[in-house]
Image: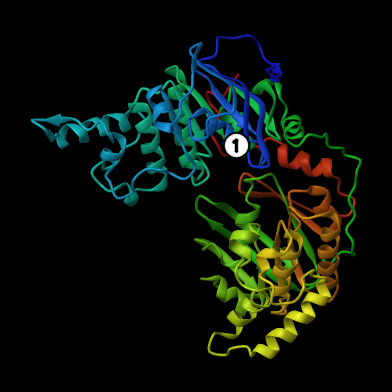
Amino acid sequence: MAVSLTVHVDAGSAPVLELRGIDKRFPGVAALQDAALRLRAGEVHALMGQNGAGKSTLIKALTGVHPPDAGQTLLQGRPIAPATPLAAQRLGIATVYQEINLCPNLSASENILAGRLPRRWGWIDWARAHAQARETLAGLQVQADVRRPLGELPVAVQQMVAIARAVSQQAQVLILDEPTSSLDDAETAQLFTVLRRLRGQGVAILFVTHFLDQVYALADRITVMRNGRTVGEYLTTELPRLRLVSLMVGREFSHDSAGQAPLPSRDDAAPALAARGLAQRGQMQPFDLTLRRGEVLGLAGLLGSGRTETARLLFGAQRSDQGQLLVDGQPCQLRHPADAVRRHLAFCPEERKTEGIVAELSVRENIVLALQAQRGWRHFIPRAEQVALATRLIQELGIKTADAEVPIGQLSGGNQQKAVLARWLATAPRVLILDEPTRGIDIAAKQEIMDQVLQLCRRGMALVFISSEIPEVLRVSHRVAVLRERRIVAERHAAGLSEGEVMAIITEAPAGAAPIAVSGAAA
């Protein structure tokens, strides 16, 4: 099978690991098609692509989680076919996942040396085990009590323990899947120092992330994937940021295609919701944001930029650890989403199947959930009132269902999304937060949902609108807040703003001192 890898780099050294023509199919889905990847010793190689591009599947094909249907994997020029992650480990391919997959109830020593604990006279030699674990961590410039249960250590230390385990196995290839997603800037900088040291020792490092700043601070080369295929391999220094994003999404961005807000400016309207220095360690940097009555505020940014984290902090679905939230100008603390519901805030999450609907319940039961929570379970909504409410909202939103008693799991994605929206409209919200409300639904359903929402805004409801489709954000928003690397980096009026201008803000290098140390970055 022909290999589709487009290489835009110098010949350089021979790859320590190479994947050629990798195919992987699941029922009804071609997850990988003729995908390719080359990793060299002593380099950090970034793997970039949108959700669904095939990055995770390629890693799983490489490490034996989902052995490929076709293609070839070469390690030091020799064909390999690991059938399990353990087999890949024994070949010197170690993976550190975003969700740390170690044993939190075991000590750091036990996690680092699992399966290889030193013994003396048939018993585990704990003194030697702790000494070896401390020595391995010291090589990564980490000091920790290796006797403590891993779950009691900070997340950053847990991440280092996972890497220490790989290092202690003399891995030739280290795969890091979103390793900085739960780390703050200082912890990320420490991790990068460790990775540069491992690079200097000849380890081939595959770095998977959504953070552009981190890629340009650390990576020597970049492989871009889209729709299960490898687009190309590039030297980091020869690939501008905006070009990288264009390769990821499959189209160029124009500075001439201006978006237009559907309504005039609402700058003079009273604030409905405001954040002042709101933040959560490792998740979102401090931000200020004001949402006015009758206004649509769009949040634009790449995956991993902090859009969803911002929405969840505003709704109390994630607990902030600094800053202040104001509802209708009054300071408040949202310790739980129920607090937000009582204050007439509403939130339609991105993952409607896991966080939005209860598939086994009827459309009626799903629609009345939030209203029942708002009233409290001691004030049960009578069945007749539930039926009347659900029937009205089904008609108003055009939800296609035989009747209100059909299990919501049997509806199409677009109609499920409308039902989730109906649930929150039943609570008469003052603020509605929509996270990717039109993802995965057809064009007609998208238009119907947005028409309904904009009608509500004209009546005074305030709306936070999140979408990965920037033209859609520009089309329905009065103002747009642009996010990058878990920060709000700019705020603009949507009228006259183009998609290209938004992408330029998203992809521009940070001004002044970079938040991540770049000494030793790829040159």
- Relative placement, left or right, of 475 versus 415 is right
Name the quadrant containing residue 424: bottom right
Q: Position of residue 413 (x, y in %)?
A: 73, 59
Question: Foreground residue, 304 or 411?
Answer: 411
> Residue 460, can we see it?
no
Compared with residue 195, is residue 356 higher up or lower down, i.e. above or below?
below
Q: Position of residue 218 (x, y in %)?
A: 56, 28
> Residue 469, can we see it?
yes
Amino acid type assigned to the residue bearing label 1 in the image: Ala
Q: Position of residue 341 (x, y in %)?
A: 62, 76
**Number of other residues with Cα within 10 Å of mark 1, as a class: few under 14, some 14 to 19, many 20 or more:** few
Compared with residue 44, is residue 289 higher up or lower down, i.e. above or below?
below
Q: What residue is rendered at 56% in x and 85% in y?
A: 376
- Relative placement, left or right, of 480 versus 9 is right
Q: Quadrant of the C terminus?
A: top right
Q: What residue is rendered at 56% in x and 9% in y?
A: 13
**How is the protein colored in the picture?**
rainbow
Name the secondary structure under disc 1.
loop
- Relative placement, left or right, of 292 versus 137 is right
Name the quadrant containing residue 201: top left
Q: Quadrant of the N terminus?
A: top right
Question: Foreground residue, 365 or 213?
Answer: 365
How many numbered discs?
A: 1
Q: What residue is rendered at 49% in x and 45% in y?
A: 183
Q: Position of residue 9 (x, y in %)?
A: 67, 14
Pointer 1: what residue? 513
